[in-house]
Amino acid sequence: MVFKLRNDYETFQVLQLDTIQIVEQLGREDLLRKIKRLTSSNSSPIASEWGKVSSSFGPMNGTQAVKIPDVSVWKGAGLVFSGQAYALFKLMLEPFGEFLPIEVEGHDFYLFHIMEEGEVDTESSSRENDEFGEPMTVNNLEFDRNDVDEKLLFKSEYEFYQAPFCNEKFKELYEEYDLEGLVFEEDLASAGWR
């Protein structure tokens, strides 16, 4: 089973950090394009160019959320791990991306830069094109089970890097560790937020 990861916006706050703030804090305008694609098509390591980055959490507009998540989605196909969640998942997730440290109000958090793509089952997936023939909307999305069975976390160009995906093993570990913040969506082509 594969799941699309979403935030539980009603209960948990979200990281108040965008790519421009990261570039400004790093003092590296030359990294703008690379950091803008951090949660989408960039699958090259950036940890060696990373530096001190800090931020805060806040409720999503229109919500009254007060809790800080253990794990949450950040800007498309990125994730944020608390120090505790990072300690639990660090070794297991290293093959699928890299952890980038950030300080949140005196606490250690980590952006997880997913560098692994999931192979789409094109026979079972479909997209709708716009008037120019460019893919616009995903109607149905399925992944090649043989490809993603061993990938705890991955992303997909097919759905325009709108969310991270995980396999059953990641979900089981997340629940076993009693972590909070994520919604595991079974409809992989679903749009919108919770």
Image (cartoon, rainbow, N blue to C red):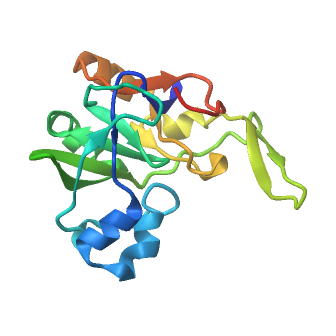
Q: Which residue is drawn at 25% across and 72% down?
A: 26
- In the orientation shown, which residue stands out farthest toward the right? 131
Say whether residue 117 is left or right of residue 109: right
Say whether residue 124 is left or right of residue 71: right
- Find residue 183 and report its image quarter: top left
Q: Residue at x 81, y 58 (%)?
A: 134
Depth check: give the residue in front, 105 or 181: 105
Depth check: give the residue in front, 132 or 62: 62
Residue 103 image offset from top left, x and y in percent: 16, 52
Res. 92 visible in picture: no
State whether residue 19 is above or below residue 60.
below
- Find residue 172 and report its image quarter: top left
Depth check: give the residue in front, 56 or 51: 56
Residue 74 image offset from top left, x and y in percent: 40, 45
- In the orientation shown, which residue stands out farthest toward the left? 106
Say whether residue 5 is left or right of residue 138: left
Res. 191 visible in picture: yes
Q: Which residue is drawn at 14% across and 46% down?
A: 105
- Find residue 151 and report its image quarter: top left
Q: Give the total number of marks visible in the rendering.
A: 0
State whether residue 68 is above or below residue 106.
above
Depth check: give the residue in front, 186 or 103: 103
Residue 59 image offset from top left, x and y in percent: 36, 34
State whether residue 110 is above or below residue 6.
below
Residue 10 image offset from top left, x and y in percent: 42, 22
Say whether residue 22 is left or right of residue 192: left
- In the orientation shown, which residue stands out farthest toward the bottom? 30
